Amino acid sequence: MDKAVKGFTLIELVVVITILGILAAFAFPRFAALETEARVATVEGLAGSVRSAMVLAHSLELVGAAVTMEGNAITMVNGYPDSTTIDDTLVDFTGFTYADDTPAVGTARFSKDGAVTPATCSVEYTESAGGGAPATLLVSTGGC
């Protein structure tokens, strides 16, 4: 009585494993780069939030209202939030480290936690210099 042989031969298994290895070698670099892209997107997202908060506080200042955001009184300089209270305008900036007067007086920096170089993966806020000039944002993504 003939029994049917079931299963794969060793050659078939080796060929399948080799093909999977080649596919993985091409796919891995694409997924490895996603971590950096995610950090860059997070930094740009926070920059948008800071920009929106800055403009909202400026709008409140223009209509003569006391500027209170998220339950915090915001100190204004030339119509825009100062560097020591810009963090109080945001609901949440989890994943970032905040430091005011960094790197200079009148600036604040939100550095991305876990970045290769946090100082160059950050959002830097600079107070208004006056004369109608708005506060500025510098978005750095080189060290993400």
Image: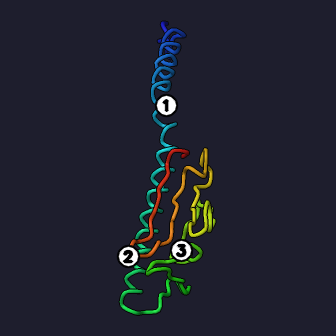
Is residue 98 among what the camera can see?
Answer: no
Q: Is residue 77 left or right of residue 99?
A: left
Q: Which amino acid does label 3 sit on?
A: Ile
Please identify, in this view, whether the residue under mark 2 or under mark 1 is nearer the observer. 2
Q: Do the residues labelled 3 and 1 touch (CB within 8 Å)?
A: no
- Element on which disc 3 rests: helix
**Residue 47 pos. (x, y %):** 45, 62
Residue lying at 60% horizontally and 52% vertically, measured from the top left: 119
Q: Which amino acid does label 1 sit on?
A: Pro
Find disc 2 in the rendering and name its residue: 132
Find disc 1 in the rendering and name its residue: 29
Tell me which numbered mark, 2 or 1, is placed earlier along the sequence: 1
Residue lying at 55% horizontally and 87% vertically, measured from the top left: 73
**Residue 80 pos. (x, y %):** 45, 78
- Element on which disc 2 rests: loop
Q: What residue type is labelled 2?
A: Gly
Q: Do the residues labelled 3 and 2 touch (CB within 8 Å)?
A: no
Pointer 3: residues within 10 angstroms few (<14), some, or many (20+)? many
Find disc 3 in the rendering and name its residue: 86
Which one is in front, 13 or 74? 74
Which one is in front, 55 or 104? 104
Pointer 2: residues within 10 angstroms few (<14), some, or many (20+)? few
From mark 2 to mark 1, how far is it between C-alphas?
A: 48 Å
Which one is in front, 110 or 64? 64
Residue lying at 48% horizontally and 42% vertically, measured from the top left: 34
Tell me which numbered mark, 3 or 1, is placed earlier along the sequence: 1
Residue lying at 47% horizontally and 58% vertically, measured from the top left: 138
Please identify, in this view, whether the residue under mark 3 or under mark 1 is nearer the observer. 3
- Element on which disc 1 rests: helix
